[in-house]
Amino acid sequence: MRESVGERRRRIMEILDQHDQVKVAHLAALLNVSMITVRRDLESMESNGSVERRHGMVARANASPQSAAEDFAAQGTIALIAPERHAYLGAVVLGARQFLERAGYRVVLHPTPSTTDPERSILDEVQREGVDGILFAPRWRTQAQEDSASATLQQLKVPTVLLERRPERHLYLPMVDSVRSDHWHGTHLALEHLVIQGHQRILLAARQDSPTARTVNSAFAEIAAAHSGIDQWMVTPSTPDALGGASRISGDTAAERNSHWVTPDLEDPHWLPTLVKEHGITAALIHSDENALVLSQRLAADGVRVPEDCAIVAYDDVVAGLGRTPLTAVSPPKEEVGRTGAEMLSQRLRAVRSGKSWTPRHVELLPSLIIRAST
């Protein structure tokens, strides 16, 4: 689908934010439009005072003149490290890549395989290659992997932004910034939505094999235990492989301490309908939404109607809307996390090149709740 004129001109301003000034020919290539089209845009934008044209180049109005070719070349190369075949982080990577390519960076994607510790060698490799910056979305299946990554992050010598991850709070990592979704807030949105609808017996069926999953688990236990509107709650794995080598609720023992952790026979396709019926559960929060689609179908097959008998909120919102009953879902701002991380890295590189100091930062973006038929 072709871009609208307004969207294309917004992109022109984004590029000029990054480059100060650019050759018109470079701009046409970045936008994938003809020289005639981009000249028409620039004529209109110059007439309203947004840009200035200077002998084959264009700059933001009142920008200081410099070599556009030098500025374009100075943007550099960014290594983008992320797991292969990972739908959630794939959306994050897409947002980052789109921003960087529009800003004129060369992006080199390094997919990480599903091995125990693939990222350390890739981080070493990209630093030897002399990249200017790194965007890093680690897999970190277990808490132990997450903890052991600290030494690797401390050894980084290239500006790096973690995507959908955050280093431990006690660590000082001067080369590392981070952008992630606030999954505690996302879990809170889901529970408040269910409580407002009158649900007092709520189940979390969740994975445990990523930092996102572990945060959802600990947030659910914390919020449910303190919520006056929730009479009964329990936590269970969502699939036989959900633990991913982890041990229950890593980093938070609220569910175990209050005897709310249950481990049914997950190989039995009827385990969730059985839990719902035996414990009078009227609502479930399920991570991930791929698991939520499967489990909602199992409920329906066992005569448990969604949402009449059991409401479902999925977590991730990658495919939640595609089921026979479209699922209400917590939707982390996946592409925005990627764009924000890429923009932060770009700002840091520009600060370093101009001799300015940079204060490392950790940014959190708020998920939203998408209401669909399952609640």
Image: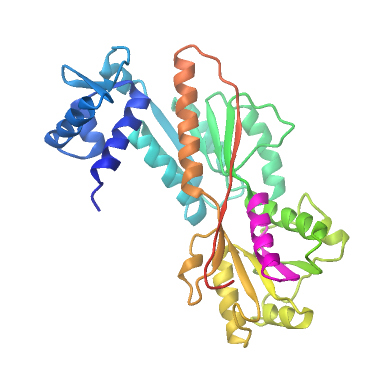
Left or right placement of residue 232 versus residue 73 in this view: right
Identity of the residue furthest to the bottom in this view = 303
- 202 drawn magenta: yes
Rendered image quadrant of residue 27: top left
- For residue 104, say whether it is visible: no
- Per the rendered image, the range of residues in magenta is 184-208
**Front residue of 181 and 151:** 181
- Compared with residue 83, is residue 33 higher up or lower down, i.e. above or below? above
* Res. 326 visible in picture: yes
Q: Quadrant of residue 237?
A: bottom right
Q: Judge from the rendering whether residue 193 lies leftward or rightward of residue 71; answer left or right.
A: right
Q: Is residue 291 above or below residue 14?
A: below
> For the point 16% across and 16% down, which residue is it?
55
Point 71% across, 30% down: residue:
171
| Quadrant assignment for the C terminus | bottom right
Question: Residue 89: where, in percent of width, then height?
Answer: 51, 50
Query: On the picture, is 51 further left or further right than 123?
Result: left
Q: Position of residue 189 (x, y in %)?
A: 64, 56
